[in-house]
Image (cartoon, rainbow, N blue to C red):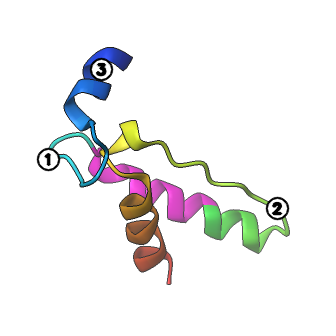
Amino acid sequence: MRYEDAYMKAHPFDKMVEGMLQSEMIAETTALMRKAIDNGVYLNVIINNRAGGNAPLIAREIVKQFG
C-alpha cells in the first residue's frame, strides 16, 4: 500500500484499522524476538502506525503473544 493511502486509511492513528495488519506480522515478530534472545542478540523492534493503524496497540499484541 502506498504511504499516502496508508496514512489516509489510518489517520488519526487512534485505533487498529481492519485489514491493515497482516496476521503473520505479530507471529513473525515474536519468533524473531525469541530467536534473538536465545542467541544472545540485542534486538530493537520498531513499530509503525502504518502497519495496522496504531503502533501502541500493535506493541500490546506483540507483548501478549510473546509473553
Whole-percent x and y of residue 60?
42, 71
Give the residue pinned by disc 3: 1
Q: Is residue 43 magenta?
A: no
Badge 1 or badge 2: first in the primary sequence: 1
- Magenta stretch: includes residue 26: yes
Q: Residue at x 32, y 16 (%)?
A: 4
Q: CA distance from mark 1 to mark 3?
A: 14 Å
Query: Helix, strand or loop at disc 3?
Result: loop
Badge 2, how many Cα within 10 Å: few under 14, some, many 20+? Answer: few
Q: Is residue 46 left or right of residue 44?
A: left
Describe the element under mark 2 as helix, strand or loop: loop
Residue 20 in the image, given as x and y percentages of width and height: 24, 40
Q: Residue at x 82, y 61 (%)?
A: 42
- With 2 as the anchor, is 44 left or right in this view? right
Number of the label disc, if any, that sits on residue 42: 2
Between label 3 and label 2, give the one nearer the viewer. 3
Asked if residue 33 lies left or right of residue 36, the reply is: left
Total count of labels: 3
Looking at this view, is 44 or 50 the one in front?
Answer: 50
Q: Quadrant of residue 1?
A: top left
Q: Secondary structure at mark 1?
A: loop
- At label 1, the amino acid type is Glu
Q: Earlier in the sequence, mark 1 or mark 3?
A: 3
Instruction: Assess disc 3: are there few (<14), some (14-19) or many (≥20) residues with their C-alpha within 10 Å of its C-alpha.
Output: few
Magenta residues, start to end: 21-32
